[in-house]
Structures are given as structure tokens and as C-alpha cells.
Image (cartoon, rainbow, N blue to C red):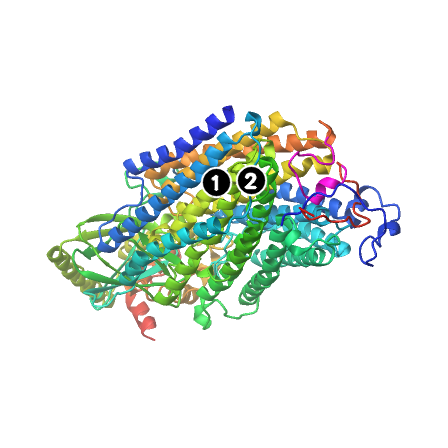
Amino acid sequence: MAPKLPLHHPVEQSSTASAGGQASAHAAPPRGLMRWLLTTNHKEIGSLYLIFSLTMFFIGGVFALVVRAELFQPGLQLVVPEFFNQMTTMHGLIMVFGAIMPAFVGLANWMVPLQIGAPDMALPRLNNFSFWLLPVAFTLLLSTLLMPGGGPNFGWTFYAPLSTTYAPPSTTFFILSLHIAGVSSILGAINIIATILNLRAPGMRLMDMPLFCWTWLITAFLLIAVMPVLAGAVTMMLMDINFGTSFFNAAGGGDPVLFQHLFWFFGHPEVYIMILPAFGIVSAIIPTFSRKRLFGYASMVYATASIAILSFLVWAHHMFTVGLPLAAELFFMYTTMLIAVPTGVKVFNWIATMFRGSISFEPPMLFALAFVVQFTIGGFSGLMLAISPADFQYHDTYFVVAHFHYVLVPGALFAILAAAYYWLPKWTGHYPNVKLAQWHFWLSVIGVNLTFFPMHFSGLAGMPRRIPDYALQFADFNVASSLGAFLFGASQLLFVILIIKCVRGGEKAPAKAWEGAEDLEWSVPSPAPLHTFEHPPTFHRQGE
Amino acid sequence: MRTFIVWMAGCLVVPLMTTLAMANGWNMPVGVTDVSREIHSLHMTIFWICVVIGVVVFGVMFYSLFRFRHSRGAKSAHFHEHTLVEVIWTAIPLLILIGMAVPATATLKKMYDPSDADLDVMITGQQWRWRYEYLGEDVAFTSNLGTPRESIRGEGERGEHYLLEVDEPLVLPVGRKVRFLLTSDDVIHSWWVPDLAVKQDTIPGFVNENWVRINEPGIYRGQCAELCGMDHGFMPIVVHAMEGEEFDSWLAERKEAATQEAQGVDREWSMDELMARGEQSYNAVCASCHQPDGSGNPPAFPALAGNQALMDDRERHIDVVINGVSGAAMPAFRSTLNPVEIAAVITYERNAWGNDTGDLVQPAEIAERLAD
């Protein structure tokens, strides 16, 4: 059953000991920099995460534009291949670990307590610590670019032995920064699980939670399961590089393919870590602007859980060409194809929700609709990639680059933008400027498709990924991709302008900022005061 | 309304672009082997399945967006959850997937059967070139990028096969089953020729298998597909497929040449001969890292020109070229180059670019050390 908006706060203090107990203990907060350094407030930490992620998004974006500028035409014009490889690598690392993941954690920080009626995250000090690890990790990572021999240049998948025996000296720092970012993710995940399992409003069962909380709960378990595997793999690299072990060195009895098994056992669930919360966001926005309940709440929860479980059984589909035995090849092909079923259930659910609704096209809805269409296109190419014999042709080409950018940019990123537009009235008390938002939306859609759609063709025509220069038959596709990338990059500046304007002023938003919005966050004033739900709200289930 | 027109236009543009691309041959190549044809047909089948599903799903979606607009006064219905519908939209995709898995499994089984090969070719990936060895035939050579560095930098013409040309192509017979044994001397590479539908990683310390039976003579081009360092984009593959008889005489010719080269080991070589031969091998094998002018690319690839340590220690110089540097990017060339080539390269490095040590390294000396 979907939760219903309760519009009143009960006056009486909760009888449970955990909730609301801290309310009176707040002394005057420190001011200036110390306020942000020491804050334990979930809204402030959420904002810090979001600002950090936006910053990283622009840094990673500039790296991508260096790559696209070099690929604008055949030949080497702007950068040398060594630097080109550092740019592709850093672009991937920064976007995955620095932009997309922290953005979702930031949204969870802000919205999970508000959606379940909790006063804050369950472990506020841990929350502060997990955020402040990130600037440390990424300063360290970015500083490797200035070290002798340059930064990581072996791709964001850092396959051994290119990333061990043949790596630049800065690799040890890269490993340390991944460790720090990993600790941050694990602590953040623990906090979200603790919050959701312990701090729900009285009467709210798990199956009453908004889907954003559900998808994040499942994501958090994925994080706890796989981040240690990544930590293990990079520690083995560290040992190979500095302490003479041979985990990934065949000359010492090790196996380079072992690295890939470890990496993708982390990496595939990681892919879903970056998309499940997006499912939750879209599942909130589509019903709101269709003014109709989500078609199948329970089946959405089960589909999310199925995707999460399957994500542990498909990792070797990234390795179809490394020489797996036939039986393994077949197993991973079948399990990978199976993922299309729960994913399809999700898309069908969103469309069934829109069917016979009453649909309007506010900015969050525009981004959510673009998400559905373009994520599905990414899903289609994913299905094609699952066909193992065909993957021998697709693997490591621009077709793969097109595929994962469709699920990550107009997929995960558009969901994050949709979430920002959806909740900005709650965060700032003002509606974002609609005209500016529409410009941002349309330029982004055009830019994204101009960038990534031609990559399907250059990949099928035979262009390998991660090359700084290419044969002449790929030239036209690359011109289109580069122009699109610069258009997309530039149009994100509109988003920054829009946020600044929205923080400063704009049309005032009421508590319930969107007519069709039904979740608990819309019962607190806009902007949400620093402390909300100091007394737990009474939760009403729809139909009661 | 304007929104919808743009959306619908977008919906039309994508299939239109797709059709255009197919028409102009920018799709996956059909290729010249039975396996590549099967893969191409799998690719087109799954592609059209996706197109049909896409048309249905997006059709319903855009119909809803158009028909049930708030601005047109649409009132939302209150239905939700419908077991039959949910069972149907779970079952239909499942059936489609099973239908797709059957032919894919059959093709994969074929690809995994390299038995009864007529010819075995060992393919070794090296930063950043390929080495081909016709097993049991005493014929082996390396295949380097044929495009001059000047044209990459934009200082020269770019030919039709820019970056997809090599100094020596892999020559294969048409109509015979050729088994590939793939490995690497350094990092992981991936040997890929789209027209042959062979893409197989080469992994240091391990040997992978794949096979091909080419149906049509011709020249087929491909590239390394796995990021392997600085010059990953500059290690192309060219396969020259010729009729069986033509191939046999080519192979016999190469065997004869190899025998002559082997005899050259025992004779005394002059400085000029070694320098000429050394320059040739150096530019093919060493220049990608140490640069044609010996300036290197520190810190990973040290300069050789004016390198005092190198000039002072002849013994160590020979040792490094033969055995490589453990834990660093310098590979061992003991099995990649023959004694003549190793001797010539070392002589060249000790006397070119003003190094002028006057040292001469004879092939016989190298052959002796290799025998140890």
C-alpha cells in the first residue's frame, strides 16, 4: 500500500525513547566554517554531499571535454596519449565515486529522514565523518595528476597488470584514496540502514515506505556487501606493487584474470548502486505528476530486490572475451538476460502509472520522463550486450561506451536532476525558475543524445574505446559526439545559475509544493526547518 | 503541445538515424566467416526485438502523455495493481529471452570448438605490437603500426587506412581452419578483427584459444581492443587472407628467409651493417617508448641518447635488452627478436644520437648468451 500524506503533527511526545529525545539538547551551533565542519544535521550534511557532488561533476566533466576535444578529429592535436589515458581514467573515477554516488547519498541524507518521519539520521556524528572523508579522498586522487609519472592512466576499471607492474608511481596514492572513499560509502550505508530500520514513524511498516527509501535500503546492503571486495582487490594491488606479492602477476604464480573477477564482483553491483536510487526517485515523481498512485508498489519493491540479488550473479558478463570456459560463458549470459525481466517490470509499472492519469509537465516530470525513455534505450543495448556471441563484437568498443553512458547520464544523472527539481522547493522554499529549467532540460536532452547516440554506430563500425586517435571512417561520428558533449557540458552551467537563483528567491512554495505529492516530506514547511519531526508524526495508511 | 511535437520528432529521429546508419554500412560488419555471419544475424535479431518492444512501450507511453494531459482536463483513474497484467508482462519478456538464448547458445558452442585445426598460429601481444608465430613452421615476425608518426601529429598525409596499416600483415589461408593461441608478454591486450568476429584477450602467463575459417580472400583490419597503456590506440592488426596454394608458397618463402637469417648469426658483421639493421629494428620495436631520437619518455621510459649509465656498462645494456627489467615496463626480448636483431639494436643504441661508444656487439655473442 502506498503511504498517504498526514497533514497534522500530533502534539504528544512519542512514548518510544529513541525518537525526538535529542531535541532539547541542541546548543547554539558554531558559525562560519566550523558550523559545516562540525555539523551533525542531516539536512546540512545532505547539502554538503550535494554541493560536493556538483563540484566533482564539473571537474569530471572538464576531463571528459578534454577527451572529446582531442577526439574531435583524427590525429593527435591537444594532448599526448599518456595524458589522454589519465583523462579517461580520472573522468570515470570522479564521475562514479565522486559525482553520482555522493549525489545519491546527499539525497538520502536530506530525504530519508523526512520521508520516514525521523528527526535525523540514526548516527549523526558518523554521518559527519562519512562526508568529510570524501573531500580528503578526492583531493588525494586529483593530486596524483601533479605527481611524477602522472595520475592513474589504466582506465577506471584498472585492470592488472597495467595497474600494478606497469602503473605510474602515483598508483599507491590512488589506492589510498579509493580506500578512503570506500570507508565513506560503507559508513554512509550503515547509517541509512540504521535510520530506515529504527527511526520510521510509528505505524509505518517497511511496505509503507516511499520507494526512494526502499531502493536506498537495498542499495545500502549492496554497498556493504561489495565495497569490502573492492578494498580487498586494491589492497592486493598495493601488496603487488610495494611488497613483492604476486596476486595478479603470472610470473610469480598469480593470475591477472583474478583481478577482473574481484573487480567486477564489486563492479556489477556497483552499477546497480548507481541506478536503484534513481528508480526510487522516478517512482516518486511519476505518480506525483500523473496525479495517480504508482501502479504496482509491491511489485516495484520485489523487482528492485530481484535486480539486487541478480547483480551478484552476472559479473563475468564484463569478461566474455577473457577466455572463460563455455559453461561459465553460458551461465553468465543466461543470468544477465534474466535481469531484463525485473527491469522491464519497472518500466511497465511507470507507464501503467501514467496511463489514464492526469499528467502535467513540470521540470521534475520532464527529467523523469526523459529518464524512462533513455534508460530504456540503455537497457536495450544492455540486452544486446548480454548475448555473449555478439558481445565478442561489441566488447570494449564505443557501443559499450554508448550503453553505459545511456544508463548513467540520461539515466542516473537525469534522475538526480529530476530529484533536485522535485525537492528544491522543500530545500529552499522557492520553486525553481521554470523557463530556465526548460532550457536546461531541452539542451541537456539534445546534448546527451547528440553525444552518445552516434557512439552506438562508431562502436558497431569497429572503434575500440579508450583510444586517443582513430581511423578516418569514424570521423563523422566523433564530430557529432564532441559537439554534443560541449553542448551538454555548457548547458549544465544553466543548472548552477538556476540553483543560485532558487536559493536566493523565486516563487514561494507551500509545504505541499506539488499538487499530486503524497509522501511525508510534504507535511513539513518549505523550506524545511533545520529540525523536523522532533516529535514523530502519526502515520496514516491510505484507506484508513 | 509544443513539448509533444518535439518529443514525437525525437521519436522519429532515432529510428531514422538508425535506418540511415544501416543503409550506409555503419552497422556491425557481416564478416567473412560462418561464425561472423551467425553473430551478425544474432545481432540483428536482438536489435529488431528491441525495436519492436521499444515501439510498443514508447507508443503506450507517448499515447498516455498526449491523451491524459492535466491541461486537457484529464481526471486520473484510481486503478492500481492487477495480477494478470503483472504476470503477463513478466512472462512475455521471459519467453522472448528464452527464444533468444537458444540460437545464441548454439553459436557460442561453435565458437568454443577449436578442434581439428589445419594451422596453429601463436599471437603474442606486446606493448605495442603483435607477434605472430606459425607453430611448427619456424616462421615468426612482429607486426608494427605502419602509419608514420608524422601523419599522426598532422605533419603528413593521412592515407585511406590511417592507423589501420602495419609493416607486416598476418597472412592466413582461405578455407582452412586456423587455430589461434593467444598470450601476452606484458599487459593484457585483445586481438580483434571485426570481419573475422574474433576478439580474444591476450593475457600474460596464460594461453587463450580461438579459431577462424575465412571464406573469402581479402585484407581485413582490426585493432587492439583492451587498454594496454600509452600506445593502445596504435597497435592495429591486418590480416591478409589468400588462397591455399598462394599461402603455401608464401610460407615456404618465409621459411627459406628464416633459415638464411639463422646462418647470418655465425658470421662477423661490420659496424655499418649492424647500424643499418639496428636502426630498422629500433624504429620498429623500441622507438614507440624510447622515441626515434632516443630521448625517451621519463620516468617510465628513460632516455637512451646521452645516457651515461648505458654507455658505461655494455654488459648491463645487453642484459636489459635480453631479459628486460623486472617490475618495470621494459620487456625481455630474448624470444621476440633473433640474435642478429638484438646485436644490431644494441650496437645501434650504443653508437647513435652522439652516444659514439664505438662498441660493436656481434650476433654470435648474443646467440651464445641466449644459449645459456
Toward the viewer: A112 or A173? A112
Q: Position of residue A334 (x, y in %)?
A: 40, 60
- Indicate the secondary structure of the residue bearing disc 2: helix
Above or below A8: residue B202: below
Name of the residue lying farthest toward the front: A544
The residue beneath circle 1 is A374
User: On the image, which quarter does residue A525 sit in?
Assistant: top right
- Residue type at mark 2 is Phe
Mark 2 or mark 1: which comes first in sequence? Answer: 1
Q: Spatial distance from mark 2 to mark 1, Cα to Cα?
A: 10 Å
> Which residue corresponds to mark 2?
A414
Kind of residue at disc 1: Gln
Task: Give the prevailing secondary structure in the magenta stretch.
Answer: loop
Q: Left or right: where does residue A397 sit relative to residue A281?
A: left
The structure residue drawn at horizontal position 79% and vertical position 47%, both measured from the top left corner, is: A533
**Secondary structure type for disc 1:** helix
**Would residue A112 be seen by someone viewing this image from the given angle?**
yes
Magenta region: which residues?
A: A509-525
Magenta span contains residue B197: no
Q: In this view, does A56 lie to the left or right of B111?
A: right
Picture residue at 57% right of the left edge, 33% below the top = A358
The outermost residue toward the left is: B245
* Viewer-closest of B134 and B1: B1
Verify CB contact (< 8 Å) between mark 2 and mark 1: yes
Decide: few, some or many residues near mark 2? Use Cα within 10 Å; few <14, some 14-19, many ≥20: many
